[in-house]
Amino acid sequence: MTADSIAAPRDGLSSLHRSQAAIQVLSPDVVERIAAGEVVERPVSVVRELVDNAIDAGASEIRVDIRGGGLRSIRVSDNGTGVPADQVDLALRHHATSKIREVHDLLDISSLGFRGEALPSIAAVSEMMILTAAQDSTAVQIEMRYGEQVSRHFHSRPRGTTITVRNLFANTPPRLKFVTNARTESAQIGQVVRRYALAHPTIRFHLVLDGHPSFHTSGRGLEHALGEVLGATLAAAMIPLGPAVAGDAEWTGFVTGVQATRSSRHHVTFLVNQRCVQSRALLAAYEAGYRPLLPRGRHPVALLSLRVPQHRVDVNVHPSKAEVRVEDEAAIAGLLRELVRTVLGRTVGSPAGDRIFALGMEQAALPRMVAEGSAEWNVASGEWLRAMHVTGQVHNSLILMENTHGLYLVDQHRAHERAIYELLVRRHSEGRAGQLLLEPLQIELTNRQIERLEPRLPELAALGFVCEWFGGRSFLIRSVPVIPETNDLGLVVEDLLDMATDDGSDWQHRLLTSIACRSATRRGKPLTPVQCAELINLLAGTASPAVCPHGSPVILQFSDQFLRRQFHW
């Protein structure tokens, strides 16, 4: 193969010929398909646009029927205001909309749709039928075939709109290459419709996949929607968030604690003024809030809702309106981070309400539904912990406490670990994390460890490890954090520095966690009542007393209601 053949365009046209091609206005057909490509990426894009229109039309009930992953057919029906008969043809034209009028309207958009592109873009790449009726108006049915109207006649139906889309992308075969199998497309559609049901809990949603009901909601509010969308067990594990307010921005929502986590980070729904959105900044803040409080690789399920004045949100930054830009995003993200960290760090876990713990034949009793009553969440604060009455120690591992609301078990190792971890973090922030060694400690590192360690030496020094290169692969350790007494300090330091050479971005957190874990009181160690009280007092002084640095629970509550239920009082 010659250099000339490598440089030649694959379609056989020379570079010279390309540069001489005349500029011309694209035909309407090409323009329509380009516009459709921006709006309609896959079947779920069609569903999103049609559901947006139904919600904007004030529908109280929306039904979504899918066949063949949406490629064979998509049908969205609603009981909204409908489109008047004399405006239906106009609705099928590009950039025709009832939602904005002037340029300044783009600065204060409350509707989900506003560009007037959805219907003509969908019609350009499918066979589409729209049947709509406004109040006290005759229904109109229009059939479109790949951008061309093929029929129009009057019909009969109640107020509302039904749009059916068939044979999606049949006129653009290359687009089909980017569409996965029907099962995957149906799963994506199901996820989107469920998020709409959480964002608009007063609307009744129905999703039918290939003739089989997938789920439906009653429209009776968020409390019911959580159970209908997520299931009763997961809904009962949701911990309320907020309201947290900063200026005119307010965060509310729900999040699961350590008792109900997932291996994927994709089980979070972000809402901005009831609009389902994606935001890297908000997602990063959310993850920063829970990451130090959950086991590595585990992620909570969450519904996070931001209310902010419409004029502070720019929704016109993404073709599919999936992303938005919010004024003062850094402050709003910081508010979310602290809200998630505070709630997860202070929420005390409880045994599942449907478990029967009684011994003997009574265990055959029918379990009670988790969702039969609202969840009770105790928030562990310093005052709350200090007011506890310590009654003793269980198996030399758990501290038993009580108050008027029930019994509490505290893992003594995790409680001490949390207190030491936050002490190390505080000393780090104050610049007094290390203690000088009487004699420097010399250790040998591998080439790979040296390569990763050298750029991190300033950060290690801030954590208490003062390391100096001593030639070859040798380093001198002149200062270390507060580490418990050990007969082999060198081995302990090598283990900790090995952790500092890991790839993860959270290596500092894991390093301090390991130090705290090594330093904390062990399970199996007897404690006097005075020592138990001192440990609880240390825990009360922490910011996140309910969770250890590894993300495991510290306190388990047996509420008074739980005890009455178990003993049938």
Image (cartoon, rainbow, N blue to C red):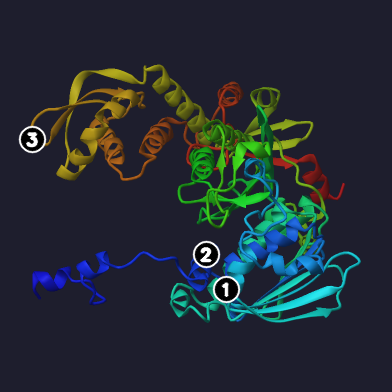
Q: What number is the disc on residue 472?
A: 3
Q: Within the image, what quadrant is residue 247 found in?
A: top right
What amino acid is labelled 2 in the image?
Ala
| Mark 1 vs 2: CB contact within 8 A | yes
- Residue 208's place in the image compared with 399, above or below, is below
Alpha carbon separation for disc pair 2 and 3 = 62 Å
Alpha carbon separation for disc pair 3 and 1 = 68 Å
Residue 206 seen in the figure: no
Q: Residues within 10 Å of mark 3 (few under 14, many from 20)?
A: few
Residue 201 seen in the figure: yes
Q: Which residue is mark 2?
A: 35
Position of residue 342 measured from the top left corner of the image (x, y, whole percent): 60, 33
The answer to which of 286 and 301 lies nearer the viewer is: 286
**Quadrant containing the N terminus in the rendered view:** bottom left
Q: Which residue is mark 1?
A: 124
The answer to which of 225 and 154 lies nearer the viewer is: 154
| Mark 3 vs 1: CB contact within 8 A | no
- Residue 450's place in the image compared with 4, above or below, is above
Q: Residues within 10 Å of mark 2 (few under 14, many from 20)?
A: some
Look at 70% across and 54% down and name the residue there.
Answer: 198
| Mark 2 vs 3: CB contact within 8 A | no
Element assignment for label 3: loop
Position of residue 386 measured from the top left corner of the image (x, y, whole percent): 66, 22
Nearer the camera: disc 3 or disc 1 = 1
Element assignment for label 2: helix
